[in-house]
Amino acid sequence: MSHAIVAPSSLERTVQCPASLGLEALYPETEQSPDAAEGEASHWAGAELLAGRLPMEGDVAPNGVRLSIEMLEGADLYYNDVYRALQPYQRHTTSGAIEVAVDIHSISPLCWGTPDYRNWVNPGRLRLMLWDYKFGYRVVEAFENYQLIAYALGAVAQMGIDAALVDVEMRIVQPRAHHREGPVRIWSCAATDLEPYRAIAAAKVEEALGPAPSAHVGPGCRDCRARHACPTLQGAAYDACDVAGGSQPLELTPLALGIELRTLKRAQSLLDARVSGLEEQVTAANRRGVNVPHWKIEHGEGRKVWNVPAAQVIQTGELLGGLALAKRVDAITPLQALKAGLPPALVDAMSRRIPGGATLVPDDGSTARRVFGVNRNVG
């Protein structure tokens, strides 16, 4: 699959660190990771559902990956969210654009991308509804998400509509990431509210394509292909080691406590980014036969999995003396039961919502910005 030079999927990183755009070009992705391949296969299954076709367990996606139950469940969650969100407007999933590319020239002539799904509705005011399906485990927020912002800008421009007449609803569907809001996160705003983000992104991309882009460490370093070769990240990681080794009084004031925890968390993320980059480099060197002192590759035994559909396994057991190779029958989820037609009152009476665990999370001010409509200032 071809990618734009300025890709929406990495735009957040370019905004954080303009130098990353050129550095990553020096280290193109040579092979797809197993996790990325599974995500692509689950995306394909979701697109099939939206188009009115029914993928099954064991089907082979175009990238050669066989669909598992987990991939299908994720795709089903994605389809269900689109279907339910469009129902009030009497729109069906097949009426929207499924993985149709858009140009995003308002950010850069080199910027284009492919939203997973989008549809237009008119509940009294024109609204663009935009979906991005994520199969990974790391939480992705919808609010102030530059990938969604870029897609929305491109979709509105493609329609040739005055942004002042449009609202935008951007949705992230992520079945495997635990989040207090659940697997679906939503950010709604007027299309004109995206202009400050567009201006920031356009300025950062212009810097990135210029002669002397600046380098800055931050969350985007975790996925940067050049993180193993970045002197800025290397220096920040060494500084993080010094911070971690520094002594602090046992009793801290609330202010000092909050500052130190924030500092160490940032140091931890920088070290993680640096370590993961070096691990990939050492692994690649070992696979080429290059010896890296202190490190070697070991392969675990792994687990055996079926490479044929489950129905074939069960049928084989029945033919060979009635061997029971099927799992115990289980009930579908409450959400699936609602879709199947079970009355909501019965579902509520027969189900409960399990409270989520208490988690300490950073407060970056995004909640206040979302409530009061104040855009962040990305320097």
Image (cartoon, helix red, strand yellow):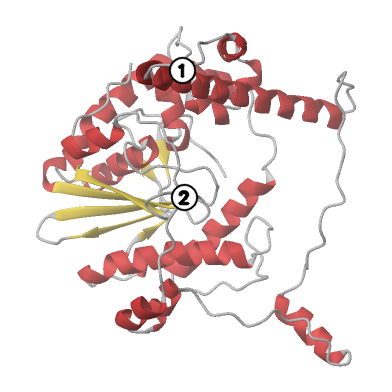
Left or right: where does residue 55 sit relative to residue 302? left
Residue 325 appears anywhere in the view: yes
Local crowd size for mark 1, using a 10 Å CA cut-off: few (<14), some (14–19), many (≥20):
some
Left or right: where does residue 68 sit relative to residue 341? right
Mark 1 / mark 2, whichever is N-terminal: 1
Left or right: where does residue 55 sit relative to residue 275? left
The residue carrying mark 1 is: 260
Left or right: where does residue 23 sit relative to residue 143? right
Kind of residue at disc 2: Gly
The residue carrying mark 2 is: 357
Residue 40 location (% of width, % of height) = 58, 52
Which residue is outermost to the front?
251
Kind of residue at disc 1: Glu
Local crowd size for mark 2, using a 10 Å CA cut-off: few (<14), some (14–19), many (≥20):
few
Residue at 69% x, 48% y is 34
Q: Quadrant of the N terminus?
A: top right
Circle 2 SS class:
loop
Residue at 86% x, 43% y is 299
